[in-house]
Every structure is written in C-alpha cells, then in structure tokens.
Image (cartoon, rainbow, N blue to C red):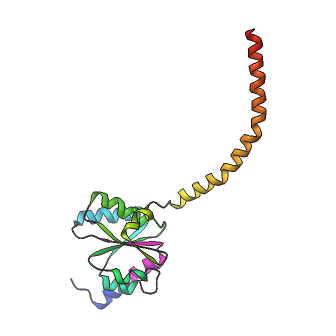
Amino acid sequence: MALNLEQKKAVVAEVAEAANKALAAVAAEYRGLTVEEMTNLRAEARKGGVVLKVAKNTLVRRAVEGTEYECMQESLTGPLLFAFSMEDPGAAARLVKDFAKGHEKLIAKLVAVGGKLYDASELERLSNMPTYDQAIAMLMAVMKAPVEKFVRTLAEPHTKLVRTVAAVRDQKQAA
C-alpha cells in the first residue's frame, strides 16, 4: 500500500527522532523472515532498548540527513530494517547477531557508530562491547586491584611471623 505525503513525513520524522537519539545503528536485510519472526524480533528489541524501524530506503536517506548516521545514505539498498541502540551502543548489534543465529535470513549489512560506517564484519566487535553496568564493574575492579594488593602486602609480614611462631610451637610439641 502506497503512503501519502503526510504518512511519509511521519515515517521520516520517526526515523529521524530515533537516529538523533541513537548511540549506534545497524541495518540488516530481513528478506524471507515471516511475520511471526519479525514480531519476535521486535519484542526482543523492546526488551533490549533497541528501536527497530522498517521503512523505504529513500525515506531513511532523508531521515538520517544531518545526523551522525548520514554516512549510511549511499549504502542503503534492498529491504532493510534499521536497529537503533538507545541505551547501550552494542545493543542493536547483539540483537541482530543473536537473532541471526537462529534465522539465517536476517543478514547484517551496515554498522554505524559515531558517524562512521563500518562493514557488517564489525558487527561481532560491536556486539562484544560491554554494557554500561559491565563497563562500570570492570572499571571498579581495575581501581580496586592495587588497593587489595597493597593491603595483602602490608599484612604479609605479620602473617609470616604468625606462621613461623606456629611452626616452632608445633615442632616443640612434637619433640
């Protein structure tokens, strides 16, 4: 069914709003997926903080003008769905990668982060990025490690003395 001008403007506005707020974007070819599979993909996307949009490439080209995803304009060919990561840069990549494992017909085509366009092969690297909570946990572990090592180092002479005294005591009791 063809869209009239107002509907096209609404689609462009929706995609532009998602693109302006997104941290990363993934375009994937969805040719051959059933309605049920697409519904499942959309449900997974909502859980992961990803906005999925399916629109004509000409409308998406207009929508991403002036955003950091303008780099995708020249590469938009074929039936594509657009996944925009809203909370975590790797969320859209994880969604597409995980869903594609069970559905070979979903094929990642483009990955864009920070105004740069990457090949679909970079999907794996983007999907392996830690989430915000994981990154904070890693940072805290790195910050905590020197302090823990320092405390262990300070406690070691006392511990060694206690072990030596205990060994002397055990030796005298055995004799």
Q: Position of residue 156 (x, y in %)?
A: 74, 36
Q: Position of residue 148 (x, y in %)?
A: 69, 45
Number of callouts in the render? 0
The answer to if 18 sits in the magenta stretch is yes
Tell me the quarter of the picture where residue 101 sits: bottom left
Q: Is residue 93 above or below residue 54?
A: above
Relative depth, front residue between 86 and 29: 29
Identify the residue at horizontal 66%, vertical 54% (top origin). Answer: 143
Q: Is residue 89 above or below residue 174?
A: below
Identify the residue at horizontal 75%, vertical 31% (top origin). Answer: 159
Q: Is residue 61 above or below residue 109?
A: below
Left or right, residue 64 beside residue 130? left
Relative depth, front residue between 68 and 116: 116
Q: Is residue 128 visible?
A: yes
Q: Is residue 19 above or below residue 33?
A: below
Identify the residue at horizontal 36%, vertical 85% (top origin). Answer: 61
Relative depth, front residue between 81 and 152: 152
Q: Is residue 11 visible?
A: no
Residue stretch rendered in magenta on the structure:
12-28
Q: Which residue sits furthest top?
A: 175
The answer to if 26 sits in the magenta stretch is yes
Q: Position of residue 33 (x, y in %)?
A: 23, 66
